[in-house]
Image (cartoon, rainbow, N blue to C red):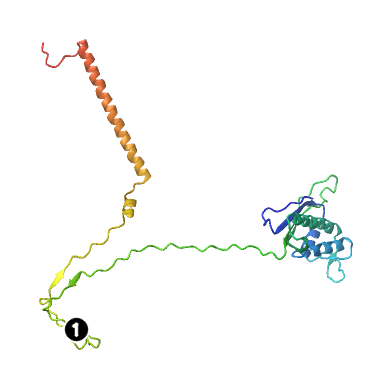
Amino acid sequence: MTTATNSKTEPGHLAAAKALNLPVSTKHCIEICDSLRYKDVSYAKRYLEEVVELKRPVSFKKFVRNMGHKKGMSSGRYPKKAAFEILKLLKSVEANAHFKGLNTGSLKITKLVANRAPNPSGGGRHGTGTKRTHVQVEVKERGVAGTKKTAEPVVQKKKESVHTQHVPKETHEQDNTAPSHEHTLGHDHASHDHNHDHADHGHKHEPAPTPTKPAVKAKAAAEELSSAELLRRAQYKAAELNRMQKERKDTEQVSNLYEELQKKGSLRSPGVKK
């Protein structure tokens, strides 16, 4: 039997152990696990000790074929061998909890599972008659609430909107000589006729204010070139410089050849006539 702690659980409040390849019946272990799951470890130890001593039967609810009744229950049995192995496993997980600093007097079984293990092949005509079972247990200290993950509030970025003030396009400036209407609190616009002559009033039309230009940062961001464009331009410039250098070298070579031919006399100099 091998026991180990479970690394996926919280290190401060849980302890776990497991037993592999136990030579006991898987059906008996399943019935015992169903009876002791979510019980206290102290109660489970007393329960299994009584089963081992044949003082208390285990109630069977799943595998009940050809099974007799026991006192105080419908179907039951005394699985002594399986109870003894599970009792050793509970003592092992209790030792693990004590090693981690948990209170062994307030431990609760949160997980108790039995699974069928691969049966080894033995010799003889009854080679497949062996039984193997895996059992896993996990306990938690009572009175310790689990930490719940609280979702962090998502801060939404508000879009900055530029509010422009509406400036009237026309400003009316009335002369002192033009007739003016004095409005009082009791003035009735429905009964009063407003006859304004635009020729009498001096209107000065001012040009509408130009809208504000976009920010300098936005303009600079729009004018920025991407890295791919910059790389393409740099490659184009480099190719052009290489081409110019190559042409310069070709012209120098041609001029050198003409000079050598003139020195040897095989090339006529300009202006010489026979």
Q: How many marks?
A: 1
Q: Amino acid at mark 1?
A: Glu
Quarter of the image for the C terminus: give it: top left
Q: Is residue 46 visible?
A: yes
Q: Secondary structure at mark 1?
A: loop
Location of residue 248 in the rendering, given as x and y in whole percent from the top left corner: 26, 26
Q: Residue at x 89, y 65 (%)?
A: 55
Q: Residue at x 36, y 40 (%)?
A: 231
Q: Answer left or right for 161 relative to 38.
A: left
Dividing the picture into quarters, in which one does residue 162 lie? bottom left
On screen, residue 110 above or below 259: below
Q: Which residue is farthest front?
A: 176
Dividing the picture into quarters, in which one does residue 148 lie? bottom right
The residue pinned by badge 1 equals: 182
Question: Closest to the observer: 69 or 231?
Answer: 231
Q: Residue at x 80, y 63 (%)?
A: 42
Location of residue 108 in the rendering, given as x and y in whole percent from the top left corner: 74, 63
Dividing the picture into quarters, in which one does residue 260 lie? top left
Question: Closest to the observer: 151 or 244?
Answer: 151
